[in-house]
Image: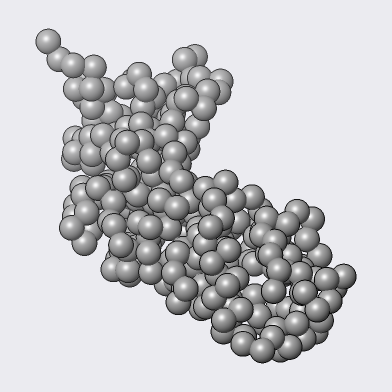
Amino acid sequence: MKSRFEVLLEDLGGRFTKDDIPKMRDAILALRQVMELPVSYLNPSSGYHPVVVFKKRFGRIVKEVPVSLLELKILNRYNMPGWRREVEFWLDNDIAVHESLLGVDAVLIGDPRTLNRIGDALRRIAQYMSVRPRKLVLFYNSVYLDYGGGRYILLTLRGGNDIELRLIRMKLSEAASYLGKAVEYMDSAFGNKNIEFYKVLFTYATSTYSTFDWFFHKYLYPNLNPEQREFFEEMQDYRNFLRLLYSYVNRLNKDRLGDSVGIRVVRRGNPHRPLEIEITFTNRGGIQVERYVRTAHISFMV
């Protein structure tokens, strides 16, 4: 007796051509892997029914056939789910392949041009990672890095300059540890990043004094106002103060990091004029430095 999947492929072969069957089989199997990923666009736990719409051009006519990834059947206007998430798969162009990317088991789904562009970026990112994922799924412009135990780092690359990072069941400290110097690479290679990325960047930067020194002189010092800069210039030993500041920042619980970190430094000689710096993580706006803190997460006296 034929399985539901085999019956579906035969039906699809009748709607398109028999030569298209292997490509549709590979696409369905790959998309079902995407469907099983937590918080993926196609994951049915969101309450939406995952659907792939196969499309192909026959001259000037575009033929399309929607298929339920959940039930493995062709859909029509009578059985089409009202709440659904659709993804288009063009049989003329799109591909679904299983291969190794720098030694990592990878599933790649999308048009070859986009896959090549993002694949090149991924290879460069992977070169700098401290710990590479067990496997990855590249789904059009979204990349799921699987670190086991339901823990994922999701990277979304748009255009040539935008990157978004999202953690799924993973702590900031874990992500910073796994990515390592790849965080610095992504910071320099992409212009627009999201809040979650900057939180991972901050967590990574506070892991050692040398990375904190790099972070401080790239993101904090250039954005200090004249009063804040004057405070640093008045310090007798600027480097020792920076090491002291690092020792306090390093003790922060990064896994409970909010959208800002407030630092208050009280001077013994002038306790009524403390130095205040608020580091704020933003979308696209990057890391901003404010004059006053709303909540002092770090407070000490010099």
Tell me the residue at 43%/43% (across/down).
170
Tell me the residue at 53%/57% (across/down).
251
Give how far across and how far down residue 133 sits, in percent: 28, 51
Indicate whether 119 appears above or below 237.
Answer: above
The colour scheme of the drawn protein is one colour
Give how far across and how far down residue 239 sits, in percent: 56, 84
Give how far across and how far down residue 19 sits, in percent: 18, 40
Tell me the residue at 63%/66% (across/down).
286
Indicate whether 122 appears above or below 98.
Answer: below
Tell me the residue at 61%/78% (across/down).
241
Looking at this view, name the residue that lies furthest to the top. Answer: 1
Count all numbered tags in the image, as a single digit: 0
The answer to which of 55 and 232 lies nearer the viewer is 232
Res. 235 image quadrant:
bottom right
Q: Is residue 285 left or right of residue 39?
A: right
**Residue 216 visible:** yes
Q: Is residue 247 left or right of residue 302?
A: left
Res. 267 image quadrant:
bottom right
- For the N terminus, the quadrant is top left
Q: Is residue 124 left or right of residue 207?
A: left
Indicate whether 259 appears above or below 210.
Answer: above
Looking at this view, name the residue that lies furthest to the front. Answer: 268
- For the C terminus, the quadrant is bottom right
Give how far across and how far down residue 143 sits, in percent: 39, 51
**Residue 77 visible:** no
Looking at this view, name the residue that lies furthest to the right. Answer: 272
The answer to which of 74 and 230 lies nearer the viewer is 230
Q: Is residue 212 left or right of residue 138?
A: right
